[in-house]
Amino acid sequence: MRDAKSDGSEIGIQQWAEEAHQNAGHLAAMLGVARDLFEADPLALLPGLQNYASRLPLDQFEQSDWITLHSDLTSFLGDVLVRRRGAAWVRGADPSSPTGYRYYLEVTGPDGVTRRVEPYDVVMEEFSNLPIEIARMIANAEVTLGVSSYIDE
C-alpha cells in the first residue's frame, strides 16, 4: 500500500481501500489460502498467517523486512475490520505525518458511537509485544473500535 501515485499526487480513499484488500489477497495466495475461501471470509487466512508469523526469524530482520511485514499485517487487519466489522477506510488530518494525513478505519459500534483506529499503530503495538499474535492484534483493534467487549476481571 502506498499513499501517493508515482507522479506524487494523492490517491483516493477508494483506491487505498482496494490496494489494502488486494495486498491481503496476495498474502492469502502466498500462504496457500484459495481466493474464493479468502473472499468468503478473511479470517480463513488467520491460521496460515499466524503460522507464518510464528516462524519468521524476527531477530534477523532488516528494516525492509519489518516494513513489508508491517504493510502485510496492516492490510490483513484492515481487510478483517472492513469485511467482518463494517469499518471503512477514512483519511484524517495529522500534522505530525509527512503527508499531513493518515489512514484510519472508522466504524459505528453497537453503542452508537463512531470510533477510529489507526491500523498501522495496532500492528506497531503488536511488534512491541512479541511474539506476534494475530488474533490479539485483531482483538485489540476491535476493542478500540468498540465492536468487541472487553471484560475487566
Image (cartoon, rainbow, N blue to C red):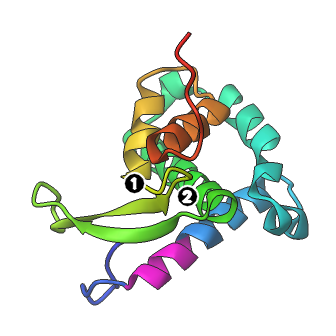
Give the image location of residue 40, x and y in percent.
Answer: 85, 66
Tell me if residue 31 is in the magenta stretch.
no
Magenta span main SS: helix
The location of residue 53, given as percent across then percent down, is 66, 34
Which residue in the rendered view is the most extreme toward the front? 111
Q: CA distance from mark 2 to mark 1?
A: 14 Å
Q: Position of residue 43 (x, y in %)?
A: 77, 50
x 36%, y 84%: residue: 11
Residue linked to disc 2: 78
**Three-letter code, disc 1:** Arg
Q: Quadrant of residue 35?
A: bottom right
Q: Is residue 1 visible?
A: no
Q: Is residue 150 visible?
A: yes
Find numbered disc 2 in the image and state the secondary structure of the residue it sits on: helix
Q: Which residues are magenta?
A: 12-19
Q: Amino acid at mark 2?
A: Gly
Q: Label 2: few (<14), some or many (≥20) within 10 Å? A: many
Which callout, 2 or 1, points at the residue further toward the start of the chain?
2
Residue designated by label 1: 115
Find out whether residue 13 is within the magenta segment: yes
* Residue 57, disc: none
Q: Is residue 97 left or right of residue 153?
A: left
Please name whichever residue, 11 or 8, is drawn nearer the observer in this view of the structure.
11
Which residue is the extreme one toward the left? 95
Q: Quadrant of residue 48?
A: top right
Q: Residue at x 68, y 27 (%)?
A: 54
The C terminus: image quadrant: top right
Q: Are marks 2 and 1 in contact (CB under 8 Å)?
A: no
Residue 75 position (above or below residue 60) = below
On the rendered structure, is 41 left or right of 121?
Answer: right
